[in-house]
Amino acid sequence: MTMSASVQNKCEGVGIGLRSAHYQDILGSLPDIPWFEVLIDNYMNEGGYPLYYLDQISQHYPLSFHSVGLSLGGMEALEQTSIARLKSLIDRYQPALVSDHLCWTAHAGLHSHDLLPMPYTAEAVRHVAARIDQVQNALGRRILVENVSSYMQYQCSDLSEAQFFAEVVESADCDILCDLNNIYVSASNHDFDAMRYLEQLPVSRIRELHLAGYEDQGRYLLDTHGEAVHAPVWALYEQALQRWGDTVPTLIEWDNNIPAFSVLLAERDKALQISRRISGDPVCA
């Protein structure tokens, strides 16, 4: 399956995370969405309905592949079978971007359902950068790594999260997927300045932004990616665009309590209004 010649292999503007609940909405009306991000771990089988629909959608839209299972920060050997399968899907669909998370997700043969944060140390920088380098060499392309939200910190950490993130991507020569919701959640939970975090990231490596929702649990914020984007995250998004410009593609990401497709379109419209206001383009009512 190859992309239609009319579809440019590029992510621009505000895209939406592809979810199975919305396959029919998308293929039935072909909405004016510039690109979709695919949770590629759900498409690792050789056949079945997920790939059937992905084949069709890829004919009309550029794609970004987003993985949650590489365990880039893990201590066990990288799963070469999974990397090889990912490589075959990359070759098949030619996504504009490929990403995973700056975290670990497996140990001693057990896989976590959570994206577990790293200790922020020089040793951890070297460890995860070497593993990212292995993945990039196997895939034959540069990847993006995403910051995760956290609720506890390691006592051994001697770098800030932003410093750690910046040193990893420079050491690995990879790019950044900056999740603004995750930054706000962690900043609130650990009492640091979210904007100061953004200021420490290497701007030339930022290739994608994520917007999502959290739950306020009173004593802490819980990153669920299962609600609309909250006002403080929209404010952080506006500050990010003012600092970096509006050319970095943005994704509306909604992973749990999947709403009607129209709800995601409304979130997309909010992001577009902010982007157009920053760029000086007319804002449609």
Image (spheres, rainbow, N blue to C red):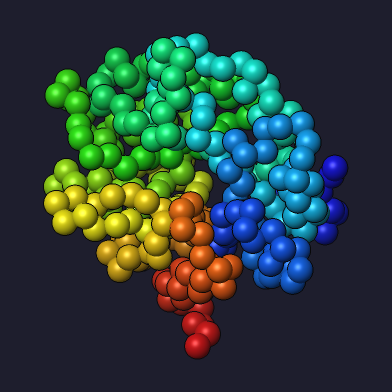
Residue 191 visible in image: yes
State the residue at coordinates (45%, 24%): 111
Left or right of 195 in this view: 177: right
Q: Nearer the viewer, residue 255 or 239?
A: 255
Residue found farthest to the bottom: 285
Identify the image quadrant of residue 150: top left
Q: The N terminus is located in which quarter?
A: top right
State the residue at coordinates (50%, 88%): 285
Up/down of 173 relative to 213, above or below? above
Residue 91 visible in image: no
State the residue at coordinates (68%, 21%): 84
Left or right of 254 in this view: 37: right
Q: Which of 207 and 31 is in front in this view?
A: 31
Q: Which of 133 and 16 is in front in this view?
A: 16
Q: Position of residue 131 (x, y in %)?
A: 48, 18
Q: Nearer the viewer, residue 15 or 220?
A: 220
Up/down of 268 relative to 58, above or below? below
Q: Position of residue 220 (x, y in %)?
A: 19, 50
Q: Position of residue 168 (x, y in %)?
A: 38, 27
Q: Where is residue 33 in the image (x, y as percent from the top left)?
A: 64, 65
Up/down of 272 relative to 190, above or below? below
Q: How many labels does the image show?
A: 0
Left or right of 213 in this view: 151: left
State the residue at coordinates (33%, 49%): 223
